[in-house]
Image (cartoon, rainbow, N blue to C red):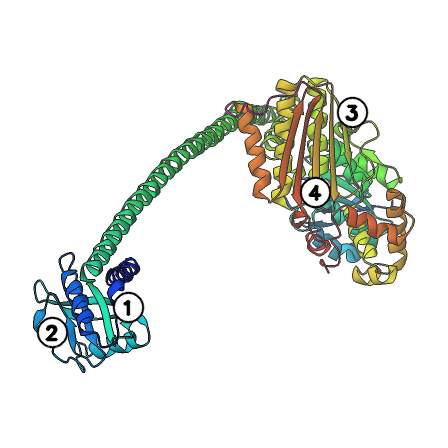
Amino acid sequence: MKQTRVMIVDNHPMVAEGIQSILETYDDLNIVACLTTGEDALQHLEASLPDVVLMDLNMPGMGGLTATELVLERALSTRVLILSMHDSPEYIATAMNHGASGYILKDVPTDEIKIAIDTAMMGEQYLCTGSQAALGKQGTGPQSALTGREQMILLELAQGKSNKDVALLYSISVRTVETHRKNIKRKLGITSTAGLTRYAMEHGVLQGTSSR
Amino acid sequence: MIEAKKAELHNYVTLAKNAFFSIYGGAAPDDEEAKLRVTQILAAMIYGDEGFYFVYDYDGNNIVSPRQTNLINQNWSGQVDSNGVPITDELIRIARSGAGYHSYIWAKPSTGEPAEMVTYVTGMQNWRWALGTGVFIDDVLLTVANTRTEVETRIARTFVQIAIITFLALFLVFISGYFITVRERRLADARQKALTARIVNTQEEERGRVARELHDSISQILVGVSYALDLARRRFRNGDDHAGETLDKGIGSLAGAIQEVRRISRNLRPSMLDDLGLGPSVKTLIDEFSQRTGTQSRFETVVFRNRLDNDSKIALYRVAQEAFTNIERHANANLVTVKLKGTRGGALMKIIDDGEGFVMSSSGSSSGLGLRNMQERIEQLGGTLTITSGRQGTKISALVPLSHILSPQSSAKED
């Protein structure tokens, strides 16, 4: 039987160890790494090759959301499930917007973690019991905001950088930048790079050339 | 005054000339009898204390000097006064060329004291006589000096008066200014004290509330869990089948404790503000508000997220919180709209309700204090908070300047 490779990223050792011990009771799961920061996760990504990353949302350093984006940027087949204390719809919507495959509240019964992993492995999204309720109240969730990565790339593009420049700057592939660019333009409804520049200026995030 | 004296002298001499014109006019240059008669007339014409006429012939011989008769019939050419001013020669020179004034030091006939005198002298060319009269101007000088002293005294007195008045006025202004300042400061102090007291009170209340919540909810739940675990252990030891049930109960209670902690922590400070930024946090606020009050709400924002620095995020969040509290308590609104966006001027948050509005001057009340707190928080960031309120509702706009919007670079590092 093929085991699912799981990476756990949580800066609370008690929680990380707890999850690890629980997941180790399942024969079809292989815990390949148990780390405490997003930065560590990125570093061990190539060595561990996880199928699923269980990612805490609140961590020192880059934090879970950014880490999620960066993991997905580098390992296209990996799925990320967010583990969080926060049951607010805004968190859930933002996490999903950053590419997570599921959202699990830390206080739900641990069975759900296994269910979430299995669901993600089937290529579907999983929202745990409490979070479904939270999103349900919301309806369709907030308007699609730019993710942190998309904002960064938008700002680079708005300053006249080419896809290649941006790819070099963030050490990602040009195709990934192209995907980001497409998503940004779609979300903003803007077609030209000049339009992106003007948009950034008008919203105060790009302040002339002085920020360079 | 001297000019007046001079004119007077001129008149005296003309008068004298007229007096003996009948004699002089028809007399020959050598008519000794006519000369004698004129001499007598002139000698008789003394006036005032010192006034007299004198006559010198062009050779310098005195002919008439009624007050100082010892001068008569002596030659005075070459005579000078104490300052070396020529007297007789100059008088004769003036007389020869017609008429004119001369001034010099002369002994007063009455006292013999030397004093400054002005003389008008005119020539009687037929007889080669210099006729003149003089007046001592020491009294004039004295008067002038006196007048000057008096004027100076008066100026000095006026100056002193003005100085005193100025000083008094300044003093008055200073005193009133001082009192106004003191009063203002006292008012400000009182206001500050009230504010501090309120802050301290709020802080204490908050701490009390948190302590109570921790004690009442979380401690009690945890104690319950502890009992449950204890019971489960005992039941395991005794081989009781219900041990698992007890454990489940304990786990269930723990979930409750986690919920409680989450609630308390979020009330203290929404970590969402740090994690997701202002937009989602305000959105959560407004959703909760809507749910609680049944008020319709609308939220508009842009796609940018979490680009504000910490101070502005928390300040704008508290402004929103305060605004919602006020709307809930007082406004009786049907619709609340929140707009949050970046602009060329900075980050702008607008909270608009269609409620009853309020009168701005109610600064003494607690809601007034809340508004002032909002104002102060935003102003501390160099931003502006404007509140307009009327019958159709209240509009609050808070603008935080561009400098609080994170630059791409710093946020890239932060991310």
Lower position in the chain sequence, tag 2 or tag 4: 2
**Marks 3,4: beta carbons within 8 A:** no
* Residue occupying the point 27% across, 48% down: B160
Residue B207 relative to residue B350: left or right: left
* Residue occupying the point 55% across, 37% down: B376
Q: CA distance from mark 3 to mark 1?
A: 144 Å
Disc marking residue B26 = 1
Q: Give the x, y percent position of residue B264.
A: 59, 29
- Mark 3 sits on what residue? A137
**Marks 3,1: beta carbons within 8 A:** no
Question: Magenta region: which residues?
Answer: B355-364
Instruction: Please check whether the numbered discs 2 and 4 fall on a single chain.
Output: yes
- Mark 2 sits on what residue? B72
Q: CA distance from mark 4 to mark 1?
A: 118 Å
What is the chain letter for disc 4? B
Residue A131 relative to residue B244: left or right: right
